[in-house]
Each structure stands twice: as C-alpha cells, then as structure tokens.
Image (cartoon, grey):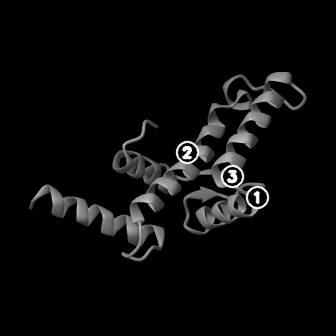
Amino acid sequence: MTNISVRDDIDSELIEALGLCGCGDHESAFDFVRGGLQLIADVKLGPHYTRNAGRFDPEFEKWCDDHSKREAAYFGSRGAMFFFYYWADDKGFTEHGGSVPGWLTEEGEAMLAKLTAICGHEP
C-alpha cells in the first residue's frame, strides 16, 4: 500500500465520519472542523479550569471576552458558530452539558487529534 492510498483511506474515513461527500474541497472542511473543535478544547485552558477562577474574577472575565472574540472571528457570525456547535453535538464530538458547545467527548478529542495531524497544525 502506498502513502497515497493510505492518505486516501484516511480521507475517506474522515469524510464519512464528518458527514461529507467526496466532492468539493474536503481539505478546507477538515481544517474548518479542526479549528472549531480546537476552540471548544481551548475552554479547558481558561482560568476557571486552571485556577478555579469564578464569575466576576477579572482574569476570568478577560479570558471569556477574548475567547468570544476568537469565536466571532473564526465563525464569522453567531448563526454559523451555533450551527457548528449543534452539528458537533449531533456528531457526538461534544457533550452538550448545560449549553452548547459543552466539552469534547473522547470521540471529539480523537477527531481533533486526527484533523490536527492531517492539517498540519499544532494542538
């Protein structure tokens, strides 16, 4: 089996798992999903996880504001952002929790790792 056929097998697996078809620009779709999942994963880097900061803590408020700006810049609109979060939940990549996006499931973490490897980004 050549490297090209291995990559084709990986692409086919990802296309199916993400609910895509084989036409169009699936490489860009892979990278878009990777970025969206990474934004969800980044929540664990916030001060509420790293040092148990609570609401009204200035560091927490700044982190939330910065994260919201990153979401807005990445998705371009609230509608696109929420559509992605609903889609990720429907695919089993996130656990809904009290609100979307929730947090990544084991499947979501595995998908993020695969997409990060395919797209060539640092986690």
The answer to whether 21 appears left or right of 66 in the picture is left
Residue type indicated by callout 1:
Arg
The answer to whether 81 appears left or right of 30 in the picture is right
Quadrant, the N terminus: bottom left
The residue under the point 31% across, 69% down is 12
3D distance between C-alphas at marks 2 and 3? 13 Å
Secondary structure under tag 1 reads helix
Residue type indicated by callout 2:
Gln
The answer to whether 46 appears left or right of 113 in the picture is right
3D distance between C-alphas at marks 1 and 2? 17 Å
The residue under the point 24% across, 66% down is 9
How many numbered markers are drawn?
3
Secondary structure under tag 3 reads loop
**Which residue, given by chain and number where applicable, does mark 3 sit on?**
102
**Which residue, given by chain and number where applicable, does mark 2 sit on?**
38
**In front: 120, or 18?**
120
**Which residue, given by chain and number where applicable, does mark 1 sit on?**
78
The residue under the point 74% across, 34% down is 66
The disc placed on residue 86 is: none
Within 10 Å of disc 2 (Cα), the crowding (few <14, some 14-19, many 20+) is some
